[in-house]
């Protein structure tokens, strides 16, 4: 077989593992998980993973069992004196981290990582993460994690993160031993995972957190042996793209070079669907590299491939919903600039593609003027071309005025075109 993985991703992708299964099992119908410490575990049928039918995350009529908080000491790992057995309070989790009060306001479980935040978004001032020894595509419902644990048992890694003064003010501290943890997780319900935690760390200020929480389950998952295509995750889009490519790979000769620019977005208009995008660079049988661009839509709560684009087409020039008069200026300027770039390249370089595109917009409602600075390549290893387009806001909406000369720019303080 010639199915090789050369994925350039920021994190381990479930899709890599799916394709790895095809490589190792030779189509024998097994799905493998590559463990951090080496080795492969057979988890389930590969053919089942490629089922496109969405799955439910909870069986009808199943009862959800949430952890019951009490004041009694919880069971502890061997080797921990019972006198030191931690007590988990019944109230919402709180404590102090890095010498600052810490109250859990939001939490999530994704790719085997439990994240507790003092804040409601990814930019929270204080964060506690527990990297659990569990398959990253499964929510570890009903499981308990402890430290110290039994001899030889894996221990979760704990990561503290906090903000510091200054433009790049963020720091973190990691712990792999000499701390106390009891983490009990209940059963999933409506993509929520209830739990309770006791954590005491050996840092200088004795950071700690204890109490109950309810974590949002995020990311692509395997549920009951099938992919959960309802999950808003780049991994979901990767899965669908790879599934589409592999279905035509009868001889198992596909080499995936890279997966790039995966993203998804909420709709701008009420009632519209979420959309997504990803680009896959691959070749078959040692041939030339091919770019396939996938556009996705979340229809009926399930992610699906809506359309594929060729190498000379840009995602921004082919939105699933053409921007109308009420579309944001940023979206309209990017759309018009992408359409112009496509048309110019087709005319001047009909056999070339468009690679590594970049579109940055800026506008002024006061002066009814806008600019889109664009960059792209005609070959994957070619030089980057840069240009800028001038737009005017007229009665019918934004319209392309012209391409700016290299020595021109817009002064947004005056609305005038000036020399660089």
Image (cartoon, rainbow, N blue to C red):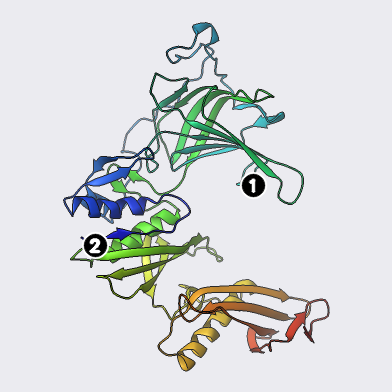
Q: Which residue is mark 2?
A: 2
Number of residues whose C-alpha sits closer than 10 Å to that of mark 2, classed few (under 14), some (14–19) or many (20 or more): few
Q: Residue 103 lies in what quarter of the image?
A: top right
Q: Which residue is mark 1?
A: 123
From what the image shows, is residue 413 above or below residue 122?
A: below
Assign the N terminus to one quadrant of the image: bottom left
Assign the C terminus to one quadrant of the image: bottom right
Q: x, y (%) of residue 294?
A: 40, 68
| Closest to the observer, 116 or 188 | 116
Q: Residue furthest right?
A: 414
Q: Residue at x 39, y 27 (%)?
A: 143
Q: Residue at x 65, y 74 (%)?
A: 361
Q: Residue 205 lies in what quarter of the image?
A: top right
- Work out how far the residue at label 1 is from the one at label 2, CA to CA, in angstroms: 43 Å
Q: Nearer the viewer, mark 1 or mark 2?
A: 2
Q: Residue 400 lies in what quarter of the image?
A: bottom right
Left or right side of 340 for 304 = left
Q: Residue at x 51, y 15 (%)?
A: 70
């Amino acid at each position: 077989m010639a199915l090789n993985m050369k994925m350039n991703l920021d994190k381990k992708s479930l899709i890599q593992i799916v394709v790895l299964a095809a490589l190792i099992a030779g189509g024998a119908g097994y799905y493998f998980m590559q463990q951090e410490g080496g080795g492969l575990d057979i988890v389930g049928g590969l053919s089942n993973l490629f089922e496109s039918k969405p799955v439910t995350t909870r069986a009808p009529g199943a009862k959800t069992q949430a952890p019951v908080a009490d004041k009694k000491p919880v069971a502890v790992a061997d080797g921990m004196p019972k006198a030191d057995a931690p007590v988990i309070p019944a109230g919402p989790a709180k404590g102090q981290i890095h010498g600052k009060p810490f109250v859990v306001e939001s939490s999530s479980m994704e790719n085997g990582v439990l994240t507790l935040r003092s804040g409601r978004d990814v930019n929270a001032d204080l964060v506690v993460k527990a990297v659990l020894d569990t398959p990253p595509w499964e929510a570890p419902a009903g499981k308990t994690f402890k430290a110290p644990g039994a001899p030889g048992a894996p221990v979760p890694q704990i990561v503290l993160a906090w903000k510091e003064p200054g433009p790049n003010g963020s720091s973190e501290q990691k712990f792999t031993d000499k701390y106390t943890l009891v983490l009990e997780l209940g059963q999933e319900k409506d993509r929520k995972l209830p739990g309770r935690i006791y954590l005491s760390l050996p840092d200088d200020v004795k950071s700690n957190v204890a109490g109950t929480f309810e974590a949002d389950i995020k990311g692509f998952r395997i549920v009951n042996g099938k992919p959960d295509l309802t999950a808003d995750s780049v991994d979901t889009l990767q899965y669908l793209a790879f599934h589409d490519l592999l279905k035509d790979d009868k001889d198992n000769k596909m080499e995936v070079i890279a997966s790039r620019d995966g993203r998804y977005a909420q709709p701008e208009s009420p009632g519209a669907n979420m959309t997504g995008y990803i680009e896959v660079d691959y070749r078959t049988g040692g041939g030339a590299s091919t770019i396939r661009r996938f556009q996705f839509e979340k229809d009926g709560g399930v992610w699906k491939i809506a359309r594929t684009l060729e190498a000379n087409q840009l995602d921004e020039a082919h939105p699933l919903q053409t921007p109308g008069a009420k579309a944001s200026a940023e979206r309209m300027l990017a759309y018009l600039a992408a359409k112009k770039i496509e048309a110019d390249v087709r005319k001047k370089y009909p056999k070339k593609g468009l690679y590594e595109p970049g579109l940055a917009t800026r506008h002024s409602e006061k002066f009814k003027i806008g600019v889109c600075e664009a960059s792209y390549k005609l070959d994957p290893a070619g030089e980057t071309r840069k240009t800028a387009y001038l737009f005017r806001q007229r009665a019918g909406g934004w319209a392309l005025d012209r391409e700016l000369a290299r020595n021109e720019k817009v002064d947004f303080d005056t609305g005038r075109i000036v020399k660089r």
